[in-house]
Image (cartoon, helix red, strand yellow):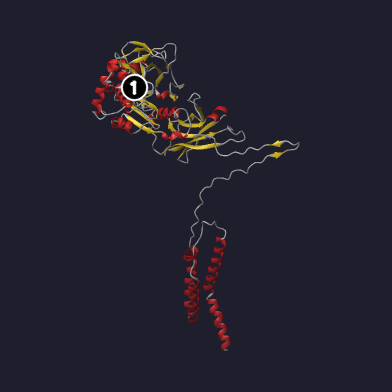
Amino acid sequence: MAKEREKKMFVGVSWNCAAELKFLITALLFVCSLVTVLQFLPPRFSLSSPDLRACVPDISTTSAAVSNSTATTAASNSTAAAAASNSTKATADAAAVNLSPPPLPPPTTPSPPPRQQDEVLEGGIIKRSFNTYGTASYNFVLMSAYRGGLNTFAVMGLSSKPLHVYGNPSYQCRWVPHNSTVPTATAAGYKILPDWGYGRIYTVVVVNCTFPSPVGLDGLGGGTLLLLASTNGGGDGSSNTTDTIPALTEKPQTLNPNYFTSPPKYDYLYCGSCLFGGLSPQRIREWLAYHIRLFGERSHFVIHDAGGLHGEVMEVLKPWMEKGYVTVQDIKEQERFDGYYHNQFLIVNDCLHRYKFDAKWMFFFDVDEFVFVPRRNNIKAVMDSLSGYTQFTIEQMTMSNKLCLSDDVGVAHKKWGFEKLVYKDVKRGIRRDRKYAVQPRNVYATGVHMSQNVAGKTTHKTEGRIKYFHYHGTIADRREPCREFVNTTYLTSEDGIPYVQDNTMRRVAGNVKKFELRMIGPRLKGTRQ
């Protein structure tokens, strides 16, 4: 009878402890499964012993809980039921523990294709193999992109010159709105190569993207302009690589439609070429004071630093920057890409489109060139007389960079460069470079000496109205320019070049000096050559 009661007690205890046993078996199964999975994880991912203990209950503690629950159950079935309920909740809590996924491994460079080997074909023909490595030049090097209106954009960049000379690359433009309910717009990209073939490893590319209708004007606004640049087999006839380039991103509510039709901020804006080398601070000082006086209060000068704005030159620029006449852009990074003359064509095109709607007229010339308007006239009257043209070119007056008057012996160091270099080259029968100005809203791309991509008329007949004096070689020479003093109105140099005395710029030097003193005071009085 006692044995039968013990047997019934054992069965009852086992039955009432079923929940605890289930929990113990589940915990052991979970640990075993976790150990199995860890064998297949990458070496960078691991779980320490403390991590495992944090994720599952301690087994010894669980065993003790089972023993205590057994004793309690033998005393009371109600107590055993409560213990089973608590144990079930603990199981649910353990199942709710969330193991964070391992971090994604960093992107890896795809392995190169297997090396091709030479083969001997039927008939003894040897088929040679060609294996490619690296990249000779980039498909596209993006510098900038700007709106040209509500439905048009311009993208400036560099591209492989051989690709464009011997291949047929193409471009496509895609506008992706931030508002997903607005459809994506697509347009063909019209490419312009404005550097006239002067490129080296890289050539300049301006891509015009004109969509059938305005983009970015939906309720939420904003979007991204993508440029799809396709090689079309250029460089490798067996492939056609297309690079998708985020060229421009507009934040919502930042587009101002009135910007493209409002009167410009400036009457005249100067887009400077790339400045590099050991420039003369004194020559830069003279050039700035002269042209700020010529163009007036509603003018601005954009200077591009390709390595030439050393400390002394910056000291000359600072007073005019503080007054809002000068903006300096550091473009030294473009030296990584081998293009013509420090990528000069790229820089002037960026300037054109960056300030396209900020200026009525935009001038392109160098800092050793001085634009001159006859005394009986002024810059506004000249520009008004040429307002019917999108572009006009300016005649060059070539000046000697070493001949000075005998009157300046002993005092030449006190005079400004354009004040003492007074002999003009009058050799006939040669073609001289011209510089130019444009109304930028009608220009699609530009060059160094003129633009071939304009809407509207161009004139070269500006003699008598405007010209420029060119002091070649003086800006990059930090010594005294007067190296030969003469006292004559006409002479022929040793190399056969005829010169005639021209005091045009000498006569305006005094007024330019007074203008500088009135505008910025004597800050630059101690400027060196």
> On the image, numbered disc 1 is attached to which residue?
481
Which residue is at the front of the view, 423 or 372? 423
Q: Position of residue 477 (x, y in %)?
A: 36, 25
- The one of 337 and 299 positioned closer to us in this rendering: 337
Q: Quadrant of the N terminus?
A: bottom right
Residue 213, given in percent of the width and then of the height, sits at 47, 30
Q: Secondary structure at mark 1?
A: loop
Q: Amino acid at mark 1?
A: Pro
Front in this rendered view, residue 502 or 325? 502
Q: Nearer the viewer, residue 280 or 151?
A: 280
In the depicted structure, whether residue 489 falls above or below residue 314: above
The residue positioned 42% from the left and 11% from the top of the image is 428
Q: Is residue 241 depicted above or below 478 in this figure?
A: below
The residue lying at 53 percent from left, 47 percent from top is 108
Q: Compared with residue 73, is residue 478 higher up or lower down, i.e. above or below?
A: above
Query: Does the image show residue 340?
Result: yes
Residue 80 in picture, x, y percent from top left: 49, 77
Quadrant position of residue 505: top left
Q: From the viewer's perspective, is residue 500 above or below residue 1? A: above
